[in-house]
């Protein structure tokens, strides 16, 4: 056999986390989610420095590169503000026609989706669940369990994130705990 060079990947996904020197990490605290929750009184009396979620991501190409892909893993803590579960900020993509995949790794959650006509629906997330998010659909995730919710995502490197539309108008329905169960209201 000829001399074959074997290269080890610089990035690993061990089933629960991304490992490598090119992994970028970010944290969202409760204060970063001001305006997301309906019950502002409950929000204001909570520890605003409390971590709601962490994200580990890899960006192998420059943002905006057509044909590239990014990958990230989100670790969403259990908790509630009033009767709303801890959740991610939620966004449309800046390039509105870009799709994305989410998949459940650990825990129990709900993927909340809203199209441009402001129709809202949700999909249950759990280990092994796979969710296709079409272009033109805003998305956020809520942790409806008692433990950490971990989910992974892959999206086009030219998708971008439009958080402003959701920050201004929110989702048309809210996911709340009603009689111990998650319900879109």
Image (cartoon, rainbow, N blue to C red):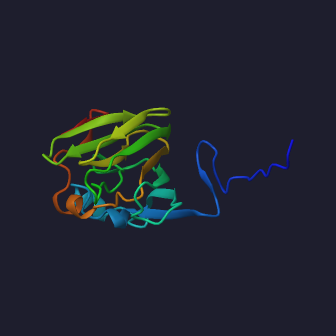
Name the residue nearer the viewer: 154 or 17: 154
Residue 174 in view, yes or no: no
Q: Residue at x 18, y 44 (%)?
A: 173
Percent from the top left, x then y, of residue 100?
37, 46
* Percent x, y of residue 22: 60, 63
The answer to which of 54 and 14 lies nearer the viewer is 14
Corner quadrant of residue 39 = bottom left
**The furthest residue to the left:** 117
Quadrant holding the C terminus: top left
Q: Residue furthest front?
A: 2
Q: Nearer the viewer, residue 58 or 67?
A: 67
Which quadrant holds residue 32? bottom left
Would you say 144 lies left or right of 176 here? right
Q: How many marks?
A: 0
Residue 50, relative to residue 69: is it above or below? below
Instruction: Give x and y (percent) for residue 73.
Output: 50, 51
Q: Give me the residue at 32% from left, 34% from top.
A: 123
Q: Quadrant of the N terminus?
A: top right
User: Left or right: 137 with respect to 77?
Assistant: left
* Left or right side of 115 for 26: right
Instruction: State the image coordinates of residue 136 (x, y, percent, origin top left).
Output: 23, 48
Q: Is residue 12 above or below residue 177?
A: below
| Residue visible at 23% across and 62% down in the picture | 167
Q: Is residue 27 above or below residue 102?
A: below
Residue 93 visible in the current orientation = yes
Horizontally, is 80 left or right of 20 in the view? left
């Amino acid at each position: 056999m000829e001399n074959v060079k074997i290269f080890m990947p610089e990035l690993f996904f061990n089933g629960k986390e991304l490992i490598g020197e090119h992994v970028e990490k970010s944290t969202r605290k409760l204060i970063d989610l001001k305006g997301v929750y309906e019950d502002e009184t409950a929000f204001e009396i909570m520890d605003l420095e409390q971590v709601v979620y962490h994200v580990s991501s890899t960006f192998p190409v420059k943002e905006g590169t057509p044909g590239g892909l990014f990958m990230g893993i989100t670790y969403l803590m259990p908790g509630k503000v009033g009767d709303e579960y801890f959740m991610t900020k939620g966004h449309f993509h800046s390039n509105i026609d870009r799709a994305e995949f989410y998949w459940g790794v650990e825990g129990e959650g709900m993927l909340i989706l809203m199209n441009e006509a402001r129709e809202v629906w949700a999909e249950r997330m759990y280990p092994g669940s796979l969710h296709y998010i079409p272009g033109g659909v805003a998305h956020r995730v809520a942790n409806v369990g008692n433990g950490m919710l971990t989910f992974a995502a892959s999206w086009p490197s030219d998708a971008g994130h439009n958080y402003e539309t959701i920050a201004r108008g929110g989702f048309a329905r809210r996911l709340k705990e009603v009689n111990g169960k998650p319900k879109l209201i």
